[in-house]
Image (spheres, helix red, strand yellow):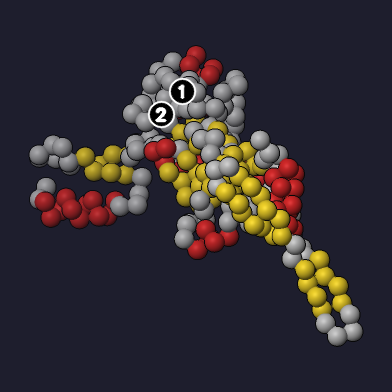
Amino acid sequence: MTNENLERLKKLLEGTEFDVDDSDSVHALVKSKDPWEGVEFVECITDQSNNFRKGKVYRLVPGKNIKCPNCIYTEDKKSGIYGTASTLGLGGTMLCFNPSTEEAYVNQLKDKAFELYGDIQDLDRFEEPTSNIDTHRAVDNLVNPEWDYIKNQDELFLYSILLYKGGKWAKKLPKRIEVVSSCCSFENDKNNYVFNYKCKIVNADNGEDARNLGEFISDQLEKYLNDEVD
């Protein structure tokens, strides 16, 4: 078969379940594509003990062959065993899972995020899987993608917040209590008088710092309410 005919055959089979094996310099073999070739995500089609659940999508362990044991990450990502499927012997995994996609896996993570947190609002605070405390701010919507999945790290971001990493989810924290200071005022027939009382806070290291009394009291109360007092 000429190179021209071979290319025409390959183009003809694009998008079909067939592929061309041209490893033989004389003949070209048309064969069914391996549905597991290049697969990185799988869907469980039967419950497998406590490790996997029917209908859920899981990641394959990088570098592992689907026909080998311990090739799929479990729910908590601590191991790659596949439960009772191991009793089926070599290739048993393919009887308990179907090939899936990264998109299906990410959509599953998004659904779980909504289940855990509901609609995430401006100034919602999270303790990320890395123990970092971060706050969702609407301004991030302008500079970061809404959802960003980093496959090699198994991380899911909502704008700048790391919600999920390798089987661990962020913890949503109570919204921080804010105290707004106000000033003292009174009115008479002619004028509106506003008084800003001052207090002095003396610190041996920083010297004197004159501050608005209302602002000072508000700051201290806010720290107390948010359990930030040393």
Is residue 16 shown left or right of residue 219? left
Q: Position of residue 142 (x, y in %)?
A: 50, 63
140 with respect to 38 (left or right): right
Q: In this view, does 16 lie above or below 189?
A: above
Residue indicated by mark 2? 61
Tell me the residue at 46%/60% (across/down): 143
Q: Judge by depth and name the residue closer to the eye, 156 or 23.
A: 156
Q: Can residue 109 be seen? A: no
Q: Give yes or no for contact between labels 1 and 2 (Cβ–Cβ under 8 Å).
A: yes
Instruction: Give the residue drawn at x 55%, y 28%.
Output: 75
Q: Quick one: quadrant of the C terminus?
A: top right
The answer to whether any part of residue 22 appears in the image is yes
Q: Residue furthest right?
A: 189
Is 105 on the left-hand or right-hand side of 14?
A: right
Question: Dividing the picture into quarters, in which one does residue 28 lie?
Answer: top left
Looking at the image, which is closer to me, 66 or 113? 113
Quarter location, residue 92: top left
Amino acid under disc 2? Val
Q: What is the secondary structure assignment of the residue under circle 1?
A: loop
Q: Give the residue at mark 1.
A: 80
Locate residue 131, reporting x and y percent.
54, 35
Q: In this view, does 189 lie above or below 51?
A: below
- Gap in angstroms between the C-alphas marked 1 and 2: 7 Å
